[in-house]
Amino acid sequence: MKKRSIDVIVLSDVHLGTYGSRAFELVNYLESISPKILVLNGDIIDIWQFSKHYFPESHMRVVKAIMSLLTEGTVVYYVTGNHDEMLRKFKGLQLGNFHIVNKVVLPLPTGKAWIFHGDVFDTTMKHSKWLAKLGGKGYDLLIILNTFINWISLKLGRGRVSLSKKVKDSVKGIIKYVNDFEGTAADIALENKYTYVICGHIHQPKIREFSNERGDKVTYLNSGDWVENMTSLEYNGNTWRLFDYQTEYSADQKLPISEKSLVESYSYSDLLNELINSN
């Protein structure tokens, strides 16, 4: 399969290590593209679920496909999310073209793109929007605040604050949450004069334009997920688009992954050893 050259790819919410992750399809996608920049926008490895010791070979192949892109010259930004928040302690780590960050700003030809996972809005959407409006430092403070709130919540036996606790089962509640999330992200991006604001977290693929009373405009984008939607964002030729695996990839493009590989499992320590030995 001939690889497609793409300027920027944004992926989020892969949730490797869970039964719902569509790793099989993601391997196909990753092995068909050649991006200059790959942004892994949070919840790529679901560290919350590692106690179940479920990490099959198909999930490991996703990790290896990303590492293969690194060796080919792709710059990879791993933006931390809530399910992989353990990695936030490594913010600023750089190994060659691989970076661990809490957010990233890309100076694209068509304007600046502010990229972050978005989980901090779960606990700060109503009460701390002013803090996020401070810009880069404000967002870092929100991450600290969110981490502290999760620590308190765990101490009280209530679990981490997450989307599953924020959104109720009713359709009305979901629509309100998504609209509030998108509006908050766009509002903060407008205040900080970004052209694009790019999130993950809510598993809702979207490209939508917002404007304020002054007529300033910002484009909100969400990369969706690889659990239900199997979508990503692609920037090429100065244009963003949503990639939809289900509509753009046919059955004959699937890679041959054996049935055996689907049941071989990696523990957390196995995963670390594989990563170390692959370097």
Image: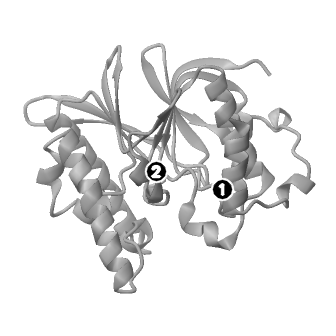
Q: Which residue is mark 1?
A: 21
Q: Which residue is mark 2?
A: 204
Query: Is 236 placed above or below 271 here?
Result: above
Q: Residue furthest bottom?
A: 157
The amino acid pointed to by label 2 is Gln
The amino acid pointed to by label 1 is Ser
SS label for mark 1: loop
Q: Position of residue 203 (x, y in %)?
A: 48, 53
Query: Is 199 placed above or below 20 here?
Result: above
Q: Could you tell me if residue 25 is visible in this image?
A: no
Instruction: Name the image quarter holding the C terminus.
Output: top right
SS label for mark 2: loop
Instruction: Name the image quarter holding the N terminus.
Output: top right
- In this view, the residue in front, 244 or 42, is 42
Determine the residue positioned at 15% across, 45% down.
133
Q: Position of residue 13 (x, y in %)?
A: 53, 51
